[in-house]
Image: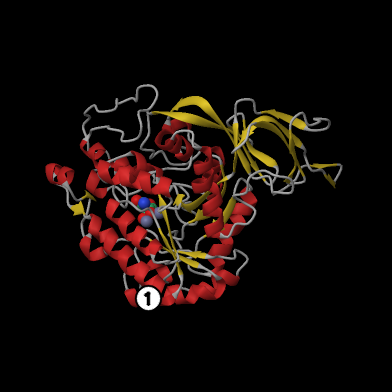
Amino acid sequence: MSKSTVGGDQVTPTYLIRGARVVGGGPTDLLVAGGVVTRVGSGLDARGATVVDADGLVALPGLVDLHTHLREPGREDAETVESGSRAAALGGYTAVCAMANTSPVADTAGVVEQVWRLGREAGLVDVQPIGAVTVGLAGERLAELGAMADSAARVRIFSDDGHCVADPRLMRRALEYVKAFDGVIAQHAEEPRLTEGAQMHEGEVSTRLGLTGWPAVAEEAIIARDVLLAEHVGSRLHVCHLSTAGSVEVLRHAKARGVRVTAEVTPHHLLLTDEIVGGRRELVGPALAGPTSGGAGTVGTGYDPVFKVNPPLRTAADAAALREALIEGIIDVVATDHAPHALEDKECEWAYARPGMLGLETALSVLLSVLGERWDLIAERMSRTPARIAGLVEHGRDPAPGVPANLTLVDPAARRTVDPGEMASRSRNTPYAGMTLPGRIVATFLAGEPTVLDGKAVR
Ligand SMILES: NC(=O)N[C@@H](CC(=O)O)C(=O)O
Ligand SMILES: [Zn+2]
Ligand SMILES: [Zn+2]
């Protein structure tokens, strides 16, 4: 990150965060200088420091997203590294892992280095590129995994996300290959033969609406296969956007066997269900404070493509199982799968709309509405564990002297009504438009400097 300069000299700004509640403790002051937390304690001397009043706020380690689509290069009309980074900072994130399904695909050292450099230039979050597993995401030949790992971007996570690495032999070779540098394969688990023409979750609602179903077994079959492959070759597997109760059971079994597998769930799969596709804006999370526009339980017109996503929104029973698994630790992390899409790709007939929804600017609020104020759990699932999986050693650490100052300050008492027009993302496809959600990100610090203050992006 660039530092402000005075008279040509590098000056490191000093901040005193006053009265923040740290996870597992009471209100305290945090002194930040030289990019790190230098002191933690009450009544710290503010001399020379810019004071940030954090009375009533909770200080979390900066959030880390293992699954973000930034769309650059190729679809800069939908999102850029910079706009997505700003959305991330506003959502309390200090690091995001950028998925490889760009155009060109991030399947070479050149492209991952480009994304990494753009992230550094934007300077709003640490952007860690994910490399593709196969050339062009075509599922035929392994991409140059070693060259991406050795590049300036130091890629450790590889994924064909958007597509499943369906060929078991390729999947096995990819898992074997990344062992050399402790890499991990992040699988988009979708057996393609079982989801041809699929439009939404296969179940009662799809039958009622007459839409082709995406069965839970298409996800579960791939996860079952992949945990066995990972066990066989002793490699690390990460499962993207887990969405069914059956997947939780497969994962539980694999973890009991000691397989090196981790899994993520998205905020939308925790909160929303397939009923919303039919127009029932029914929220499955604990009752939200305040009415939701559209009103929980009311019936709208349905078929709103903003709710089209891959994997699809599932049943209330699936969402409940996902929430329990997240609390229990069978699911390791929350990842947004922030998937911006341009208006023309979303405001069209359901069948033609692209799947995917925004997530970065609402994730923490959705988690607060799902879990309540369980700050240690939130820090674990949204910061510490994702940082560990991605190998981002400067992130996911609770504030203590000497720790890099990657922090976010949350106002738990605030309520916000989500307005797509106010988002920093270049796209507008949030599924929470008009809903009132708890919590607000007041400030985010990246390497000791604010990227967000008073709830507004600093740059
Ligand atoms: N989640 C989605 O529905 N879409 C993602 C791809 C993906 O995560 O599979 C996208 O890139 O738009
Ligand atoms: Zn995916
Ligand atoms: Zn994705």
Query: Residue at horizontal 40%, vertical 62%?
Result: 255
Q: Secondary structure at mark 1?
A: helix
Mark 1 beta carbon near ligand 2 (under 8 Å): no
Q: Is residue 91 above or below residue 73?
A: above
The residue lying toward the viewer, choosing from 438 and 298, is 438
Q: Is residue 60 left or right of residue 275?
A: right
Quadrant containing ligand 3 = bottom left
Q: Is residue 81 above or below residue 368?
A: below
Q: Which residue is mark 1?
A: 170
Residue 231 appears in which quarter of the rendering? bottom left
The residue lying toward the viewer, choosing from 290 and 115, is 290
x then y, percent, for residue 301? 21, 32
Locate the C terminus and report the quarter of the image it occupies. Answer: top right
x then y, percent, for residue 289? 40, 24
Query: Residue at horizontal 26%, vertical 43%?
Result: 317
The residue lying toward the viewer, choosing from 361 and 346, is 361
Residue 118 appears in which quarter of the rendering? bottom right
Q: Is residue 17 left or right of residue 175?
A: right
Residue 260 appears in which quarter of the rendering? bottom left
Residue 340 shows in the view: no
Residue 440 shows in the view: yes
**Few, some or many residues within 10 Å of mark 1 (<14, 14–19, 20+):** some
Q: Is residue 254 above or below residue 343?
A: below
Query: Residue at horizontal 19%, vertical 51%?
Result: 202
